[in-house]
Image (cartoon, rainbow, N blue to C red):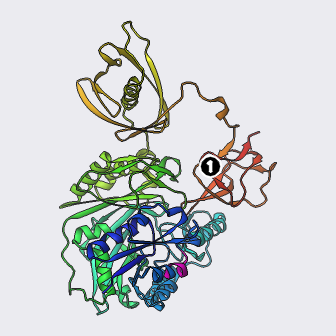
Amino acid sequence: MISTVLVANRGEIACRVFRTCRESGIRTVAVHSDADENALHARVADAVVRLPGAASADTYLRGDLIVKAAVAAGADAVHPGYGFLSENADFARAVTDAGLVWIGPPPEAIEAMASKTRAKELLGIAPLTDVTETDLPVLVKAAAGGGGRGMRVVRRLADLDAALTAARAEAASAFGDGEVFVEPYVEGGRHVEVQVLADTHGTVWTLGTRDCSLQRRHQKVIEEAPAPGLSAPLTRELCEQAVRAARAVGYVGAGTVEFLVADGRAHFLEMNTRLQVEHPVTEAVFGVDLVALQIRIAEGHALDTDPPPARGHAVEARLYAEDPVNGWTPQAGRLHRLAVPDGIRLDTGYTDGDDIGVHYDPMIAKAVAHAPTRAEAVRRLAGALERAAVHGPVTNRDLLVRSLRHEEFTSARMDTGFYDRHLADLTSPAPDPLAPLAAALADAHGRSRFGGGWRNVPSQPQVKRYAMAGEEHEVRYRHTRTGLTADGVRVVHADARLVVLESDGVRRRYDVARYGDDRIHVNTTTLTALPRFPDPTAQHAPGSLLAPMPGTVVRVAEGLTEGTTVQAGQPLLWLEAMKMEHRITAPATGTLTELKAVPGQQVTVGSLLAVVQAP
């Protein structure tokens, strides 16, 4: 029997595995980088071991350090979570060589399937080698890992070499393996996968299908189970192929076989030899705990002959600290509050007051709803996210709500190009017009307790300015002997945290939370209080390129120096933030008059990187 489990991972998945371990009476061990010293997964574990450094390559990708940590902490088993070393056969062997139980598939199965190139070869599918114009579009893809890292769509042959270089660099940084390959890019398809679970006694379960078609940058955003709208014959084919793939490599434990479904046909993508991020929707539908089953299988227990029956439908949305409007740029900062309504499963590696850093994936949480039907599950999740309190950095919460309510999604006609077609509409501003007034009134109440008095003569209107959804809004209100008033709106109640307004006979409640001097959350609307007189020293020269996120300068374009002529859209440098590379391009054709960025430099949001002066 396993008594103590070390999770060779961080954040949400570490917390999720720890939860099952606690329920099973198993002690837990966490590892953490210096950047994660105060992270939630390090706080909730029974024992904690530091991995010196912050970069993944120095910490969570150091299998030797993790095995030493497990031995030092007295663990007798290691769970790899997902990402990092979860599909690394050498790490699995190192764990077992140290006398520990590996809660995962055999190293030989990982070697056969963890490399996408070898997996395709095993199934008789050859990657593209000599790409020609007739092969376009193609997808450059990392051989190891997942999560959309090391992937690039290429539509012009002239862009292939640059895509290969960028994909190799990103894959090496994220997975410690820079191998990439090229395959045809199937457009208009759906991403469908099958959950498999196999024991050491020859039983292989398939736990239905999942649809993960809503993706940005080849990384999943919304997933559901079962995949809607598949014919019974196609579903059988998918499950049969998944079982064949598992049996072909002697698979043991939890794994996922992924397909692209287009024109009623299934195209094999890969087999992920680990637990998937989206596993909670399968757990909800089948009423199982996949982590508990992983542990039982690792202890040698046999699965029942058949899996439990499926019930209802489940939908999961990944809440990211990112800005979909501005190229999905990752965000960092203090997460002041995170709360969703009751009845929604929330898997997260953060709690109120935690900091979202720049070193790792920007996912804050996964929200999961389960209901008897798909329509009910989708409606429940959209409503819960709409009412959730997410106070802190910019997130994709509004995008998730609109995506779940989009007609193409509700009618199950989505495919992997969903965001390419609809991103502009899904991110168009639709703020509550009364939110700035509620913020101003709450602020006025807070200030009135500290010396603000009422006057017996008519007062001049008070003026407040806010930035909301990229636009400035000016608010005017007055102090009177009967309270606060605003033109056309009746102020029913106002204090520092709650404002009730009545407009056109409709009364609405506004919960207000303020953090620092300028960041205000009014229900689900985020505002920034603007100074009455803007600081003239905060201006930058025209053509200034500012860092859109905190991160590290990893590369500067070859031969780029001050005085160089650049073309609009030309890549100038690359930032790495949260395990992704972000390209910074010239905003216009002109002369590079300043180049402040150098490789290895740490930058914060708004740091000056370069200046391109137009002629």
Say whether residue 168 is magenta: no
Viewer-closest of 428 and 447: 447
Vertical placement of residue 528 versus 5, above or below: above
Residue at the (33%, 34%) spot, across then down: 497
Residue farthest to the bottom?
201
**Quarter of the rendering containing residue 500:** top left
Vertical placement of residue 124 versus 209, above or below: below
Vertical placement of residue 269 versus 481, above or below: below
**Quarter of the rendering containing residue 582:** bottom right
Viewer-closest of 261 and 180: 180
Residue at the (34%, 86%) spot, across then down: 298
Amino acid carrying label 1: it is: Ala
Which quarter shows the C terminus? top right
Vertical placement of residue 34 versus 567, above or below: below
Q: Position of residue 227 (x, y in %)?
A: 29, 67
Region rendered in magenta: 61-67
319 sits left or right of 536 in the view: left
Viewer-closest of 23 and 476: 23
Q: Residues within 10 Å of mark 1 (few under 14, many from 20)?
A: many
- SS for callout 1: loop
- The secondary structure that most of the magenta stretch takes on is helix
Say whether residue 64 is magenta: yes
Q: Position of residue 413 (x, y in %)?
A: 33, 58
Quickly name the residue at label 1: 547
